[in-house]
Amino acid sequence: MSRNFAETEIKFLKGVGEVRAKLFASELGVCTFRDLLDYFPFRYVDRSKFYHIRELQGDMPMLQIKGHFLNFSTEGEGKTKRYRGAFTDGSFMMDVVWFSGIKRISEMYRPMKEYVLFGKPTQYKGYWQMAHPEIDEYNPERPPAGFQGVYSLTEGTRKRGFGQRTIQTAVANLLSLPAFASMGETLPREVIERYKFPSLSEAYSELHRPTDPTKLQRARERMKFEELFYLELQILRYSKRRSYQLTGHVFGRIGEYFNRYYTECIPFELTGAQKRVLKEIRADMRTGRQMNRLLQGDVGSGKTMVAFMSMLMSADNGFQSCLMAPTEILAGQHYETIREWGEKIGLKVALLTGSTRAKARREIHAGLLSGEIHIIVGTHALLEEKVEFKNLGLAVIDEQHRFGVAQRAKMWGKGKIPPHVLVMTATPIPRTLAMTVYGDLEVSVIDELPPGRKPIETWLRSDANRGEVNRHIWRQLQEGRQIYIVYPLIHENEKLNLKSLEEGLERTRETFRDVEISFVHGKMKPAEKDFQMQKFVEGKSRIMVATTVIEVGVNVPNATVMVIENAERFGLSQLHQLRGRVGRGADRSWCILMSKEKLAATTKQRLGIMTETSDGFLISEADMKLRGPGDMEGTQQSGIAFDLKIANLAKDGQIVQAARTAAEDVLAGNPQIAGVAEPMDRSTALRLENASLQILATELKRRFEKKVDWSLIS
């Protein structure tokens, strides 16, 4: 695409001008010709047919009706003021109503003149009406429009009389410009030919003004592929450049620490998945390149043991390790576990958090600098400038999405050679999303639970079953177990018909008298929150009433029941994370999803998935399909923004795969794109001519030049 043409300000387009250009920019984010071309319709309507009012029924889509107004009237005052027109198609009548722009509307339309209305019919008090329809004078010599794109609008555009017609006219004027027909390509010729895509101008024309369903489908595929191709290409460039530019510590030996622990001290047999992942990590850390690996695994799958044994490899080669966790409680729990394991083989383990006293802090700083401390566990306190290592070899990050990338960057500066990086997450990510979100990390998956872990039973109940649920909680309390009760809100909210922690705490105290209860929420002071959490962790309190702050980082093996109030308000991945707080011991455990009596079909389907499976990967796939990737927690990767205008990671898995394959083939044939030189190692490698390489360079710069380059860190 010609850069000058594409970057022309939209005010220079016929029919736009200065005033409308400001509205395009402020309301729709459309400032240039390119922005307008990329402002795709979100759906299409068939304007080839005229409907009769007598044909209207049920919930119908936007449609068009031909007829005339009989009269107009103004009703109400102030905020309730509206302008009404009685419209007939010659046989039946319907109302047309406007709630804003009344003065302008009253001057535009006249009784008995033939018009075509286009809008969505709705019923009001038994009568059909259309609110703010698009209206054209009827011209018998002009055929119906056929398929037409419908664009997203805002309340601000509607109030200014800026409707579908405004955008459609602007797009039509843009597509008719001679420069549009001759604009350059944004994909290499070789890629277009391999996938038999339409040209860029053909794709844009078909997307905005469809002529044929098959051509429209191919145009959508081309534009989705293009978005994803450049996203994947940028991610793969990051990964390849890092692997060449960043040397890593060579962990060439497995020594006494690892062998002693594995043969004499390990508390249980490793699963096959844990052994496989340890081999993958071992292979990474002996190459001389920095390891950058993502470790995915459900709650309880044994990620911490894998991380610890990776730290033993580091220690065997004379290096230190650190584990960084997002909360003090989680850091404390990791420390207790790793200290217990490490002491058995003579490893010194320390804990550093914001609460560490000054004297202990000075001792830890000295121990890290001298090399006396082998493993340090901590929070963001590990990132402070005063924290220096003798030779940091491995950095493990738990739940990395809770740390900002700039924060994590500080860790890699704590040595002349950046440490190997192992990122752990208990939030399973669907394959198509992980391919993109964590596309520059090697991925390991622990897909087995240790033997002896009992599956968690999940029930779906409503307030009508409250007695049954309370009796079940009492039985567990009498057996010495502990209970979680989670609420979506802290305070009562009149606008939301949801249960709150405040009223829930009161009701729990009434129902379970003489039982010690803890409560935590996000607005509590850290010290008070830690006190309440610690009471529960130590077993001094038996019930924990909380918001989702306990979603990650609370390990209480004695807790066997998780009650989630208003479960319909939570995403599946979040429900799965909360469910993972129980079932951490050897006892049978339950997750009880409390919901409203009447649920929408999609909500019932969503919650039903939770009762049918405990597989976090199946749940995350379902969650992404139902809610889309943007709602999933922790899926924004460092330096890579999901600014997708037409592609959908949840629904376009096949196109994601095709785009990634194409990006891999292009890089294999043209390694200079990543700033490295290596022979082709793929039979499908695609070597590009100079003109195509220039297209790639231009597009990569345009799409990513404003992004911070975090390619040399995780």
Image (cartoon, rainbow, N blue to C red):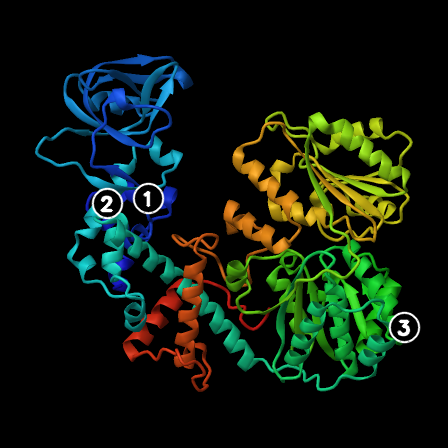
Nearer the observer, 4 or 427: 427
Q: Earlier in the sequence, mark 1 or mark 2?
A: 1
| Quadrant where the N terminus is found in the figure | bottom left
As helix, strand or loop, the secondary structure at mark 1 comes to helix
Pointer 1 residue: 24
Labelled pair 3, 1 in contact (Cβ < 8 Å)? no
Nearer the observer, 660 or 702: 660
Q: Amino acid at mark 2?
A: Ala
- Quarter of the view holding residue 699: bottom left
Pointer 2 residue: 170
Nearer the observer, 1 or 445: 445
Give x and y (percent) for residue 382: 74, 65
| Quadrant where the C terminus is found in the figure | bottom right
Assess disc 3: are there few (<14), some (14-19) or many (≥20) residues with their C-alpha within 10 Å of its C-alpha: some
Q: Give residue 66's mark.
A: none
Between the residue at mark 2 and the residue at mark 3, the CA separation in whole angstroms equals 73 Å
